[in-house]
Amino acid sequence: MDTAEYERAWRELAEGVVNRKHGFHTFTLATVGADGFPTARTVVLREADAATRILRFHGDARSPKFDELRGRPQVCALFYGETERFQVRVSGTATVHHGDDLCRTIWDAMQPISRETYRTPFAPTSPREESDSDAALLALPDAFQHFAVCRIAVTTLEWLALSRGINPRARHDFDTDGAMRTHFLHP
């Protein structure tokens, strides 16, 4: 079995973590809302580990997406790099971390400017009032309470390489023991 494009998928994901200009730096995360309908948003890729098949992103723990992830941890993530002409779609199970040792370790390693986002007293998607002001920002140590980490355990990875002529595509499914099954697909 040729695994070159599968390995490329993980290389592109890893590059997206460290290169802000790479097409995979941000991706679309789809969850299922409490109303049963899908919701999607863009998040920033913070980790892509091929050995463990883990993807990671961060966010504000008050965001509705974290309630969705706790209630229904099955997710789909879609990456597309226009320059790379490569698409990766993963399905997996999300685990939310909030206030634990993993969050603390990541928080402590973050650039100070990245922590600023979590100082706002207003929850994401909460109604905005005309009188709202970010003047009363939380102290930086207190902002940690809003920081959450999500790790996605990839159970399926599908890639599509766009090229002239044939556009190769495959799906890789992972058994609970980690064994990979590959299915080559029509584009």
Image (cartoon, rainbow, N blue to C red):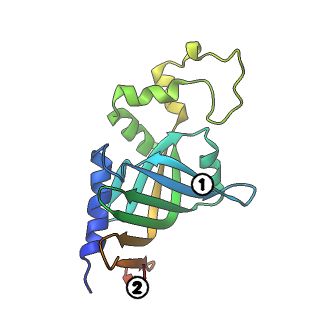
To which residue does mark 1 refer?
69
Q: How many marks?
A: 2
Q: Which marked residue is nearer to the observer: mark 2 or mark 1?
A: 2
Amino acid type at circle 1 is Leu
Q: Quadrant of the N terminus?
A: bottom left
Residue at horizontal 50%, vertical 18%? 139
Q: Is residue 50 visible?
A: no
Residues marked 2 and 1 touching at CB (< 8 Å): no
Q: Quadrant of the C terminus?
A: bottom left
Distance of mark 2 from mark 1, alpha carbons? 28 Å
What SS does tag 1 mark? helix
Which residue is the site of mark 2?
183
- In the displayed structure, 107 sits above or below 156; it is above
Q: Position of residue 170 (x, y in %)?
A: 38, 79
Q: Which corner quadrant of the image does residue 13 belong to?
A: bottom left
Q: Is residue 68 above or below residue 146?
A: below
Residue 130 seen in render: yes
Q: Position of residue 23 (x, y in %)?
A: 35, 52
Residue found at the very far right of the displayed protein: 35
Dot 2 or dot 1: first in sequence order is: 1
Residue 172 against residue 31 in the figure, above or below: below
Which residue is pictured at 26% across the width and 78% down the height? 3
Q: Amino acid at mark 2?
A: His
Q: Secondary structure at mark 2?
A: strand
Task: Find residue 26 and report its horizontal and vertical position in percent.
Answer: 41, 48
Nearest the eye: 146 or 156? 156
Give the camera-side residue of 86 and 64: 86
Q: Which mark is residue 88?
A: none
Please tell me how crowded label 1 is: few (under 14), some (14-19), or many (20+) other residues with Cα within 10 Å.
many
Residue at left offset 67%, top offset 18% = 132
Q: Position of residue 67 (x, y in %)?
A: 64, 49
Q: Is residue 168 above or below residue 25?
A: below
